[in-house]
Image (cartoon, helix red, strand yellow):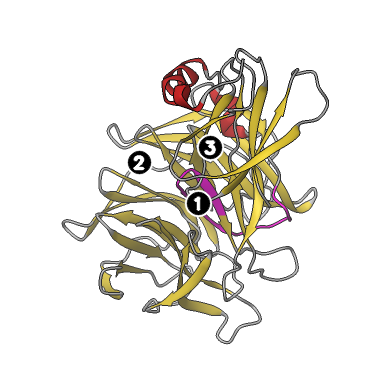
Amino acid sequence: MKINQRIIQGLALATLAFNLQPSTGFAQGGVWTYKAPIPIARQYASVVQLNGQIYAIGGYCSTNDPVKLNSVEVYDPVSNSWTPKAPKPHPGHGFSAGVINGLIYVAGSPDQQNGSLDVYDPTNDSWTSKTPPPMPCFAAGHAVVGGKLYLIGGDAYGWQRNYTQVYDPVTDSWQIGVSAPNLGPTACCVYNGQIYAVNWSYNNQRGTGMVSVYDPATDAWTGKTPMPTVTQVSCLEVVNGLMYAVGGWSQDFGVTNLVGVYNPDADTWTNGPALLEPVNAMGTCVLNGVLYAVGGQNGTTEISSVEALIPYSVSINMYAGLTICGQIGSTNIIEYKNELTDANWTPLTTLILSNNPCLYIDTNSTWFSHRFYQAVPAQ
């Protein structure tokens, strides 16, 4: 018996109910793809997402004049293109950035001495300057919790620091929290209202890989399982409840394309899908469930490459279909196999996501077919 188009709508709820997707398998699976390169190659750019677009602010480029950038470009994932915006008042790299109430706050000390805090308003493409951080901080970890910007660690005057600096945009003022266990440049992200920090440099040498968690409510730090493969990570992002430590540099093997995945609920590390090319000091953000890595340095010079980690899902069910999660407008290849032990997947069709998530039904499959499906982003 063939599935009739008239019963597809009725099967939709059944498909969702019986769609077995282990969260760890879905979140860690994915394919890196290249996107439109950023116009000016750079490392240590400040990258954030706002209103469905990605902002790349400042950075450093040894082949540019001047080398410290104040340029701002905005990436539109729908058109896969970059657009220039008003330049930042203070040029430099290694700033810490966060979005609060529709504004982008960019703070730090690119020369490890003189600090600044510039605020960008996308509604009128303009910048204003606010009170700079009290302690100099280059390449500090950064996060936004409760409408406040947190800066963790960083370099100052050539030495690693463990400051916890908190900015309140309502009062335009800074406070100093309890010192972090991590010393020096740090990668941070937010999960369940807490700030996770991974130490990726110690006295400009081998990083410790220390993982610490800061609770803003109690102003206290706790330790977690360190990274098993220590790299000087320049980013840490949350995708589907897991944290991705992307690329970096190690004294053991130089610039790498390794991706470590940390499960904060289980306090465990696993390996994620490797980048297409080794890169260090890139800027990252997550938009619509897609992790973007912008620019960076390949061990020799700055690069303009942009990579995106598109998640894919594997559906195990009895209803000839699957639910696909990904970027709206992306093209996905639907593949199937009749047994999980089959060595290869067979291409079936292509599907452009019209919403997120998107339900696919194989109308040519037999009823109760036990066929298995997966969706892989088209290259």
Kind of residue indicated by mark 2: Val
Which x, y percent locates residue 22?
56, 21
Return the mark for residue 356: none
Extent of the magenta region:
275-292
**Labels 2 and 3: the sequence-earlier one:** 2
Q: CA distance from mark 3 to mark 1?
A: 25 Å
213 displayed left or right of 263? left
Circle 2 sits on which residue? 178
User: Can residue 78 be seen?
Assistant: yes
Which x, y percent locates residue 239?
50, 39
Q: Is residue 102 above or below residue 376?
A: below
Q: Residue furthest bottom?
A: 65
Q: Nearer the viewer, mark 2 or mark 1?
A: 1
**Residue that appears at 58% across and 53% down:** 234
Circle 1 sits on which residue? 329
**Labels 3 and 1: the sequence-earlier one:** 3
Is residue 288 located in the magenta-colored stretch of the structure? yes
Which x, y percent locates residue 5?
50, 27
> Could you tell me how many numbered marks the image carries?
3
- Mark 1 falls on what kind of element? loop
Is residue 163 located in the magenta-colored stretch of the structure? no
Picture quadrant of residue 13: top left
**Residue that appears at 56% across and 22% down:** 21
Kind of residue indicated by mark 1: Gly
- Mark 3 falls on what kind of element? strand
Local crowd size for mark 2, using a 10 Å CA cut-off: few (<14), some (14–19), many (≥20): some
Circle 3 sits on which residue? 243
Q: Is residue 263 above or below residue 196?
A: above
**Residue that appears at 50% across and 77% down:** 69
Picture quadrant of residue 115: bottom left
